[in-house]
Image (cartoon, coloured by chain):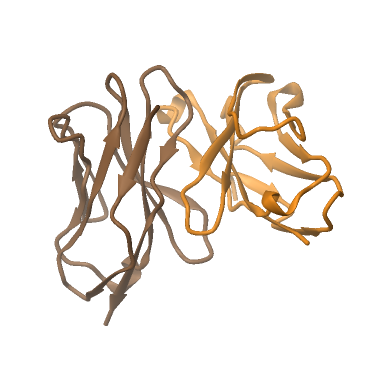
């Protein structure tokens, strides 16, 4: 079945550092890929998405590129801020499916 | 607030009791989803409605769980004879054609079974 693997956290960075959170997936066909973010005390919010190979999703300075050859969708940001501290979830929606399959989440802590 | 709302936000119950949660989706969304999230894990899919029809159920949805969406608006998730293993955050999401069927999540209901 479909699955998503994320790097374990927590990831601790200083403000303005470069961020990479790795995400790889297993799925048949051509899934859509997503990054969701969960800020402390809040619900899940869609951060960005990509629906086909080589698409780049971007939002709020975050980017991720859909790499079918490596089955990856790594999240990157050039300069993190304290306000980016949150839990980040990689997810996929399999071909012909409605449900999302999530990774286990990666907690990011940004220190001033 | 026009987002997805869930009630109650917190529920503490004793093992063996029944509990019911409610989800109110974004008004124009015809699809509604329930997920369960345990500590340190990502959400896991439970069930999905399109309008009032329940179209998919996960293996996680045991016989003690039942979900309804009468008239295709709000939805309820009932757990009968709760067990300690049911303790989790129950998340509701909705989606609609106008936003490319992307799923928007509510704040969740945290269930603690003692």
Looking at the image, is A40 positioned above or below residue B3? below
Please report the residue visible at 20 percent of the width from the left and 34 percent of the height from the top: A71
Number of numbered labels in the structure image: 0
x 23%, y 51%: residue: A22
Residue A15, by quadrant, is bottom left
Q: Position of residue B9 (x, y in %)?
A: 69, 57
Task: Residue B74: give x, y in percent of width and height.
Answer: 71, 34
Q: Would residue B70 be seen by someone viewing this image from the given angle?
A: yes
Q: Quadrant of the C terminus of chain A?
A: bottom left
Q: Quadrant of residue B26?
A: top right
The hue used for chain B is orange
Of the 4 image quadrants, the one containing the N terminus of chain A is: top left
Picture quadrant where residue B13 is located: bottom right
- In the picture as drawn, the residue positioned furthest to the right comes out as B17
Q: Is residue A14 above or below residue B94?
A: below
Q: Is residue B90 above or below residue A25?
A: below
Q: Residue at x 28, y 36 (%)?
A: A25
In the displayed structure, does residue A22 sit left or right of residue B37? left
Where residue B55 appears, x then y in whole percent?
A: 60, 18
Residue shown at the point (17%, 72%) measured from the top left = A16
Q: Residue furthest bottom?
A: A112
Colour seen for chain A: brown
Q: Is residue B35 left or right of residue A65?
A: right
Q: Is A36 on the left-hand or right-hand side of B71?
A: left
């Amino acid at each position: 079945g479909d699955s998503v693997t994320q790097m374990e956290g927590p990831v601790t960075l200083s403000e303005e550092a470069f961020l990479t959170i790795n995400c790889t997936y297993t799925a048949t066909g051509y899934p859509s890929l997503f990054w969701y973010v969960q800020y402390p005390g809040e619900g899940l919010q869609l951060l960005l998405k990509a629906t086909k190979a080589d698409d780049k999703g971007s939002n709020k300075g975050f980017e991720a590129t859909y790499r079918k050859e490596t089955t990856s969708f790594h999240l990157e940001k050039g300069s993190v801020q304290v306000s980016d501290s949150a839990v980040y979830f990689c997810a996929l929606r399999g071909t012909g499916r409605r449900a999302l399959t999530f990774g286990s989440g990666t907690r990011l802590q940004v220190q001033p | 607030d026009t987002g997805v709302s869930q009630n109650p936000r917190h529920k503490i119950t004793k093992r063996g009791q029944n509990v019911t949660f409610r989800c109110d989706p974004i008004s124009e969304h015809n699809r509604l989803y329930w997920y369960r999230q345990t500590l340190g894990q990502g959400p896991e899919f439970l069930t999905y409605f399109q309008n009032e029809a329940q179209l998919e159920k996960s293996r996680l949805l045991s016989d003690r769980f039942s979900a309804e969406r009468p008239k295709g608006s709000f939805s309820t998730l009932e757990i009968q004879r709760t067990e300690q293993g049911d303790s989790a955050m129950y998340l509701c999401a909705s989606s609609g054609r106008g936003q490319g069927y992307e799923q928007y999540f509510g704040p969740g209901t945290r269930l603690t079974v003692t």
